[in-house]
Amino acid sequence: MAINMEITTLKVYSDSKLIISQLLTEYEVRKDDLVPYFRLATQLLQKFEAVTLEHVPRKENQMADALANLASSMTLGEDEAADVPVCQRWVIPLATEMLLDDTNVISVLPVDVEEWRQPLIDYLEYGKLPNDSRHCSKIRRRAPRFLYYKETFYRRSFE
């Protein structure tokens, strides 16, 4: 997403000292099943002008700890995949033979006409407001909490 948004400087925080040290090439990646992830991460990091990698201990970052626990609790076989919603997008585990250039994932969800996001999307993208004045003020009040970028609806947060 950062690449699509043409961000040039990236700060990466992780609760895994091992992963940060491997990406900084201080440590060698020894587990064969982690090599594809390391290669993909390295390829992605090269697309930025400046990258800062920083270790944050789990005790100091409860959100990172919760995400790490979720990831470690997922045990999948070689031919299995799991969808995990993150920021209303899907994270798909890498197959060992998958390379960055071969990756092309599109998630399509049918949108109901009465779906709650559609008036917000209409306002964020086109400035269009509903005729009902009460609904109109509700949309204006809620809109700053969201972002509509490249046909994807995001909820803004401090994380």
Image (cartoon, helix red, strand yellow):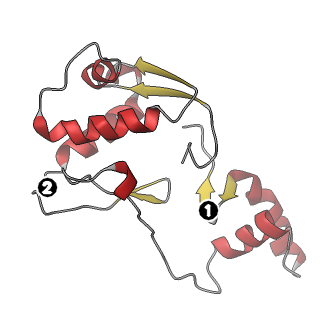
Q: CA distance from mark 2 to mark 1?
A: 29 Å
Q: Residues within 10 Å of mark 2 (few under 14, many from 20)?
A: few
User: Relative to 39, is 52 above or below?
Assistant: above
Q: Is residue 69 above or below residue 123?
A: above
Q: Which residue is mark 1?
A: 153
- Residue furthest to the front in view is 101
Residue at point 39%, 53% (across, down): 101
Seen at 48% across and 75% down, the residue is 108
Q: Residue furthest top?
A: 26
Residue 91 at what x, y percent from top left? Answer: 36, 55
SS assignment at label 1: strand
Of 107 and 41, nearer the camera is 41
Q: Position of residue 1 (x, y in %)?
A: 54, 48
First of labels 2, 1 by sequence position: 2
Q: Which residue is mark 2?
A: 76
| Left or right placement of residue 142 versus residue 150 in this view | right
For the point 65% across and 61% down, the residue is 150
